[in-house]
Amino acid sequence: MARMAGTKPKTRIQRKNTEQILGAALEVFAQHGSSGASINLIAKTAGLTTPNLLYYFESKDAIRRELLARTLQLWMAPLNMLSPHGEPVEEICQYIRRKLDISKNFPKESKFFANEILSGLPQSKSEIFGPLKELYNAKIAVLEDWIQTGRMAPVDPHHLLYSIWATTQHYADFDVQIEEIAPEKAKDRFADAEAFLLEMYRKLLAV
């Protein structure tokens, strides 16, 4: 967490510098991964000296943990909005739309989170997977209820969520690949992806 966190409210300049550091760190982590990032590179990217940065955060890991906490909330929000009271297929389609919006509007956050998962989260597993598993299990129960009550086709709910994560996050995490192998598809990839994925999942899940 931030070194200077406490009961005294931050000044406008302090809030600005904190966000500037986190924005720079996100860019560095997304590009270089946790192992390739350094406190000096983050400070340079933020336009600050290293001692100035360390006034706000005591270490690279403190910055990383703050970014993880923020990114986890962003990542979980679309799933949290999946309502058990809605029409099942449309609820899932709305979830897909929200996940694509995250990929489109927060690509650095998506890459950062993917890099952290690939690293095995050696220092943060309980912080990340605890709340994520709780939400995941709650939504799996919703999907199972929809299937058991005949409101949705009988698919494996776990693989359903895994496939949605994979197909939507691909457009942020592998944007370089898309732009290189199919540049003509890169510009409108999110709109095209939405149309394709919604048609595919509607066919898969229709009763």
Image (cartoon, helix red, strand yellow):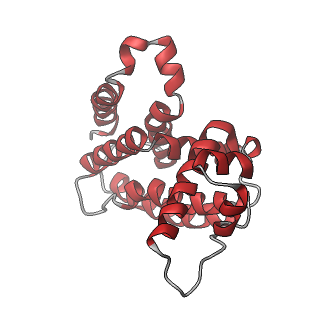
Residue at horizontal 27 percent and vertical 41 percent from the top: 207
Residue at horizontal 45 percent and vertical 31 percent from the top: 171
Residue 48 higher or lower than 108, as above or below: below
Which residue is more in the foreground, 185 or 140? 185
Q: Quarter-wise, where is residue 30 in the image?
A: top right
Which residue is more in the foreground, 163 or 130? 130
Q: Quarter-wise, where is residue 2 in the image?
A: bottom right
Which residue is more in the foreground, 127 or 91? 127
Residue 98 x %, y %: 34, 47
71 left or right of 62 in image: left
Residue 131 x %, y %: 55, 67
* Res 120 seen here: no
Residue 136 x %, y %: 50, 59
188 left or right of 126 in image: left
Residue at horizontal 33 percent and vertical 55 percent from the top: 146
Quadrant including the N terminus: bottom right
Residue 147 x %, y %: 36, 51
Residue at horizontal 42 percent and vertical 40 percent from the top: 103
* Res 133 seen here: yes
